[in-house]
Amino acid sequence: MASDKNITRKILQERILKIVPMFNYLWQNDDYTKDVLAGEYDLWFNMWQNQSSNIEIKVPSTAISSLMVCSKDMFPIISSLLRILSTLPVSTATAERSFSTLKRVKTWLRTTISQERLNDLCLLNVHRDLNMYDKNEIIINNFASKNKRRLDFVL
């Protein structure tokens, strides 16, 4: 059991040390930061390993709860990394882009359009980067050959 904890601890420490180059713009000296982070990590790991045996103290399970209990003076780098982790966005703008497209199309066409056509127009707008111009001539000829579009009125 103790060897499993040591293996897990080593793997986690290696992963954490890989983070340093990603955020090296925050710190002046990369080698110094790796050493300090390794020391902070050992203290942090030991602190929570000792606390986990205590029933009264709850080990934090999220980045924000970890940040709340992290001493900025004792763990400055871990505190910075937790602050970055807690403020990272959780979603991408693709869904928002789809919603704004739908809103734009609906505003333009209002309610005079069927749901199927509205979906098709939204898909065309969202995926407008696809090159469909090569197939336009084929589509137009196919549409024109389907049926006679002009009605003859008899008076």
Image: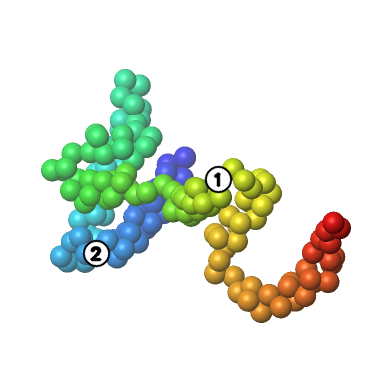
Query: Residue flagged by tag 2: what amino acid is it?
Result: Asn
Sort mark 2 into few (<14), some (14-19) or many (20+) by Cα contacts within 10 Å: some
Residue placed at 73% from the left, 73% from the top?
Answer: 140
The residue under label 2 is 24
Q: Which residue is mark 1?
A: 110
Quadrant hosting residue 49:
top left
Vertically, is 143 above or below 64?
below
Give the mark nearest the N terminus, 2 or 1.
2
Q: CA distance from mark 2 to mark 1?
A: 51 Å
- Mark 2 or mark 1, which is nearer to you? 1
Mark linked to residue 50: none
Task: Give x and y (percent) for residue 16.
Answer: 34, 55
In front of the other: 40 or 109: 109
The residue depicted at 85 percent of the width and 65 percent of the height is 147
Q: Is residue 62 visible?
A: yes
- Tell me which residue sits at (67%, 46%) in the image: 114
Task: Check disc 1: other Cα within 10 Å, few if <14, some if 14-19, many if 20+.
Answer: few
